[in-house]
Image (cartoon, rainbow, N blue to C red):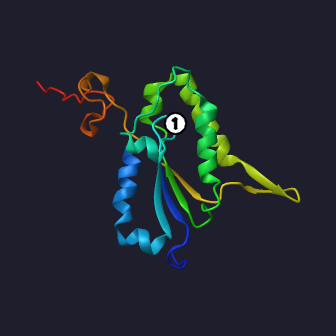
Amino acid sequence: MNPRRSQGEGVLLMYGDSLGVFFADSLKTREFCHTSFKKCDSKYNWVYPITKEQIANGGRTRYDRKDFNQNKVLDAFRKVIHSPDIDNNSAVVFNFGLHYVESTNFSNYQKLIDGLIEIVKEQEYVNGIGTPKTKAHLIWKTTTAINKQKAVLNLHMEQKRFLTYQVRKQTK
């Protein structure tokens, strides 16, 4: 993004889990959001996108007992980053971490990541010249893994998101 552009252009969009939503909500009240973008927003997803109606119902979705549908996830992401209000002055910070790692096996997660990369690399061709289909600046936000041994009571306690126990080396 060009730091010298006029104020209030483009959209800053957080796309991901609840931590992204919390981050977006904290930015909405800051001067940065109002002076740098015309809109700061978030799109919440667990594994699949969650609608405002589902959020009003406590964020619950109906479990359909079907296998993980990678195409459903990829189509939702593609729709968001190619929406008309996302332009070359926009930034999308996205996260495909913890909920996917918990919800599917490693090979399916690899396929999801490969699919996301293909979406980011998609081109539009005019007169044989390709340009990126995605106009926004994309920022891939990672997340820490959760240590299941520590997460017996509450899987969503942020202070428990560590892959391994921290070990202090004993000196003799």
Residue at x-position 38% and y-position 64%: 28
| Quadrant position of residue 71 | top right
Horizontally, is 19 left or right of 67 in the view?
Answer: left
Local crowd size for mark 1, using a 10 Å CA cut-off: few (<14), some (14–19), many (≥20): many
Q: Looking at the figure, which quarter contains the C terminus? A: top left
Residue at x-position 63% and y-position 56%: 83
Q: Amino acid at mark 1?
A: Tyr
Residue at x-position 50% and y-position 70%: 38
Residue at x-position 57% and y-position 25%: 108
Horizontally, is 122 left or right of 168 in the view?
Answer: right
Q: How many marks?
A: 1
| Quadrant position of residue 131 | bottom right
Visible residue check, residue 36? yes
Q: Nearer the viewer, residue 25 or 36?
A: 25
| Quadrant position of residue 169 | top left
Mark 1: which secondary structure? Answer: loop
The x, y position of residue 39, in whole percent, is 49, 66
Residue farthest to the left?
172
The x, y position of residue 67, in whole percent, is 56, 21
Q: Can you say whether 113 is above or below 141 in the image?
A: above
Visible residue check, residue 16? no
Horizontally, is 92 left or right of 152 in the view?
Answer: right
Residue farthest to the right?
127
Q: Looking at the figure, which quarter contains the N terminus? A: bottom right
The x, y position of residue 13, in whole percent, is 50, 57
Q: Which residue was labeled with disc 1? A: 48
